[in-house]
Structure formats: C-alpha cells, structure tokens
Image (cartoon, rainbow, N blue to C red):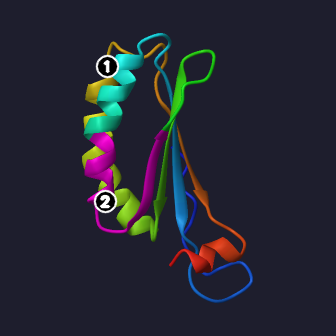
Amino acid sequence: MGQPGGGPHPQGGEPVSLVRMVRLAFGPDEAAAERLAADLVPAIRAREGCLAAVFFGPTEDGDYGLFVHWDTLEHADAAASVIGPRLQKAVQGKVQEPPDIAMFQVVGPEAVAAR
C-alpha cells in the first residue's frame, strides 16, 4: 500500500488531504460486495478524520471500488489499522484477487476546500 508523505499543500497553505482507493475484484458475487459496503462504509465514516467514504461499482468484470477521503495521514493510518484487517477478513474467499490498495495526495484547490 503506497503511503504518500503528508505535508504542506504544493502551492503553500494548509496540509493536503489524502484519498485511499481500494479496488476489489468480486466478479459475479454482487451480494458479497453489497454486504461488504453495508458493513464497512458506516464503520469507515465513523472514524476520526474521514471526510467521505463511497463504495462503487460494478464494472463489466465485477470490479468494485472504495474511495475514502482523509484529512490527515495519521487519521488514515489509524483507520487502516482497524478497518484493514476487517476488510481482509470480509473478502477472504470472495474476491478473485487480493484487494488493490493505493493512497494519493489530493492536489489542487480541492485539497484546501475539503477541509
């Protein structure tokens, strides 16, 4: 899982916010994807520092995604330590490949406006 460094906004100002993106290859098991969304999204939204959490999909191949916008790297990492194991357990045996998880810094005016 890539971890960008936190820090000041590239054009100065407040620190950037972060987005964690998770791709999940459920294939045809739409019910498993819906159960995961119903379980995890409220738990993620309840975590300190979560600005938004959205579960989306499917693609034609049965891929789903989870988008989570965090205010700081510290809050994102704290949530990952709790939510990550829960996610891994929930998808075990239900996905066609391991979850693809990446973290990105939010750049541009949205980085400051979201705060």
Residue 52 located within the stretch drawn in magenta: yes
Query: Which residue is labeled 2 in the image?
Result: 78
Q: Does residue 73 appear in this view?
A: yes
Residue at 46% from the left image edge and 23% from the top image edge: 98
**What stretch of residues is rendered in magenta?**
40-55
Q: Give the Cα distance between marks 2 and 1.
A: 22 Å
State if disc 1 and disc 2 touch (CB < 8 Å).
Answer: no
Question: Residue farthest to the bottom?
Answer: 13
Side of 68 relative to 44 (left or right): right
Residue at 28% from the left image edge and 61% from the top image edge: 47
Residue at 31% from the left image edge and 19% from the top image edge: 92
Q: Mark 2: which amino acid?
A: Ala
Q: In this rendering, is residue 109 above or below 80?
A: below
Q: Does residue 85 appear in this view?
A: no
Disc ID at residue 92: 1
Residue 73 % position (x, y): 45, 66
Q: In this rendering, is residue 18 above or below 31?
A: below
- Residue 104 figure quarter: bottom right
Side of 37 relative to 109 (left or right): left
